[in-house]
């Protein structure tokens, strides 16, 4: 209770025009629109993104739609998977806006949407992950290093086979230093929209 109250207080700012305290609408890369149910997301997911999103949910508990303008990836894969799992648990829909772009961890985040849609002229990118000098493709199929991603895809609604098929497609589509922009046929084949 106290933690929730503190989050709400810190999420407020002074309105200079009328002296009324109103909740802030900006939480890192997330901005709540005036309908109080829609969030616009723009930027890379960082180690602060989960905390920012939790503060957002405390201040705006009716949020149910995330519109992504651009999310080129994540700087913290573990936080990204936790954040994405929370979005899915909260039964939120995600829309990739006209001319929007998602790639890498941004694509993983998009998959958290219970309903996933996109506008026109969008780009969806995938590639292998890397940790230090090792890339995902350095580990054999079925290796434990692959499992957290496969488990995540299953947790957001993929079957085990769909999760494995998509995951191995992503890591083989392009090396970590490059990106593969998915074709419409690939987007359909791997069930990216829902």
Image (cartoon, rainbow, N blue to C red):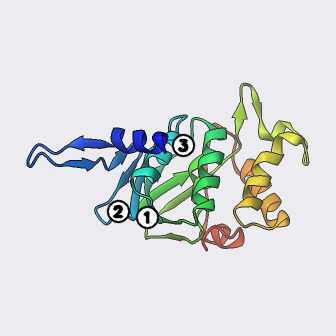
Marks 1 and 3 sit apart, C-alpha to C-alpha, by: 17 Å
Structural crowding at the residue carrying mark 2, measured as other residues with C-alpha within 10 Å and reported as few (<14), some (14–19) or many (≥20): some
Q: Which residue is mark 3?
A: 50
Circle on res. 134:
none
Secondary element under disc 2, as helix, strand or loop, is loop
Marks 2 and 1 sit apart, C-alpha to C-alpha, by: 7 Å
Q: Position of residue 188 (x, y in %)?
A: 66, 73
Relative to 165, is 119 on the left or the right? left
The residue under the point 59% across, 48% down is 83
Looking at the image, residue 110 lies above or below residue 149: below
Secondary element under disc 3, as helix, strand or loop, is helix
Work out whether mark 1 precedes mark 3 in sequence or the reverse, and give the earlier one: 3
- Is the residue under label 3 in contact with that under label 1 (CB below 8 Å)? no
Work out whether mark 2 precedes mark 1 in sequence or the reverse, and give the earlier one: 2
Secondary element under disc 1, as helix, strand or loop, is loop
The residue under the point 30% across, 47% down is 24
Name the residue at the left extreme: 17
- Is the residue under label 1 in contact with that under label 2 (CB below 8 Å)? yes
Residue 125: in sight, yes or no?
A: no
Q: Position of residue 141 (x, y in %)?
A: 90, 48
Q: Which residue is mark 1?
A: 62
- Could you say which is closer to the camera, residue 33 or residue 67? 33
Structural crowding at the residue carrying mark 3, measured as other residues with C-alpha within 10 Å and reported as few (<14), some (14–19) or many (≥20): some
Relative to 118, is 26 on the left or the right? left
- Could you say which is closer to the camera, residue 14 or residue 63? 14
Residue 175: in sight, yes or no?
A: yes
Relative to 30, is 18 on the left or the right? left
Q: Which residue is mark 2?
A: 36
Q: Position of residue 27 (x, y in %)?
A: 39, 44
Relative to 17, is 190 on the left or the right? right
């Amino acid at each position: 209770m106290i933690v929730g109250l503190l989050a709400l207080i810190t999420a407020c700012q002074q309105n200079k025009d009328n002296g009324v305290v109103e909740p802030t609408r900006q939480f890192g890369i997330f901005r709540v629109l005036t309908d109080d149910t829609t969030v616009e997301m723009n930027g890379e997911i960082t180690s602060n993104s989960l905390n920012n999103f939790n503060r957002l949910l405390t201040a705006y508990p009716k949020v149910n739609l995330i519109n992504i303008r651009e999310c080129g990836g994540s700087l913290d894969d573990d936080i990204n998977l936790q954040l994405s799992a929370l979005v899915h648990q909260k039964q939120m829909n995600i829309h990739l806006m006209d001319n929007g772009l998602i790639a890498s961890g941004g694509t993983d985040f998009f998959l958290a949407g219970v309903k996933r849609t996109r506008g026109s002229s969008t780009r969806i990118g995938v590639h292998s992950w890397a940790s230090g000098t090792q890339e995902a493709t350095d580990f054999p199929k079925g290796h434990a290093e692959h499992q957290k991603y496969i488990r995540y895809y299953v947790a957001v609604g993929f079957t085990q086979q769909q999760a494995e098929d998509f995951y191995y497609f992503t890591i083989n589509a392009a090396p970590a230093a490059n990106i593969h922009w998915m074709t419409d046929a690939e987007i359909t084949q791997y069930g990216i929209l829902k």
